[in-house]
Image: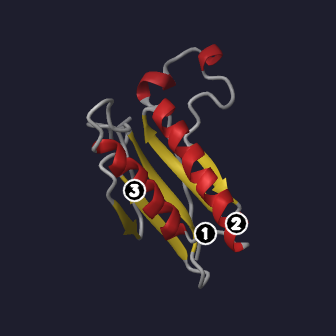
Amino acid sequence: DGVALAAVRSSAVRGAPDAFCAANWRERVHRVDDEIVCVICGLIADATALLGEIRNFCADHRARWGDAPAVEAVARHLGRVLHRRTQLAAGRPFGAAFLVAGFGGDGTPKLFRTDPSGAYEVYGAGGVATAGAGPDED
């Protein structure tokens, strides 16, 4: 059993010259904590801010409890942050969706999907993409 995450550059970026696609440019797969990784989809600036938020959550959890947070706790926290942002009168909601993966306390692989509304759900397998995006039919 395990968890595998992958990301594909968007078709607009695939055609860009290599100078614009330097290492770490528009990176989609990120390590959140020692046992948790995620894939982002959407606005990179929003996703980067949210990634910092969940990394801080993991660090705070480790400092307080001496152990890594459960994957579901990270997905739930991310959902709460996303949902809070939808209720602000000033500003806009975050424009990023996440797949958050890791291993549960019992050692089983877990995969959660969050969307910009703040909803999160568990998946056996899943994907996130921008509107109208799907696999290439080359």
Q: Amino acid at mark 2?
A: Arg
Pointer 2 residue: 62
Q: Give the left or right position of residue 32, taking residue 91 as reference.
A: right
Q: Which mark is residue 69?
A: 1
Q: Position of residue 1 (x, y in %)?
A: 58, 77
Question: Eyeballing the image, is 27 above or below 20?
Answer: below
Question: Eyeballing the image, is 77 above or below 136?
Answer: below
| Number of residues whose C-alpha sits closer than 10 Å to that of mark 1, classed few (under 14), some (14–19) or many (20 or more) | many
Q: Give the left or right position of residue 68, taking residue 112 as reference.
A: right
Residue drawn where x is 43% and y is 22% of the image: 12
Q: Which mark is residue 79?
A: 3
Dot placed on the residue nearer the N-terminal end, 1 or 2: 2
Q: CA distance from mark 1 to mark 2?
A: 7 Å
Contact? badges 2 and 3 (CB < 8 Å): no
Residue drawn where x is 49% and y is 24% of the image: 13
Contact? badges 1 and 2 (CB < 8 Å): yes
| Number of residues whose C-alpha sits closer than 10 Å to that of mark 2, classed few (under 14), some (14–19) or many (20 or more) | some
User: Quadrant location of residue 5?
Assistant: bottom right
Q: Amino acid at mark 1?
A: Pro
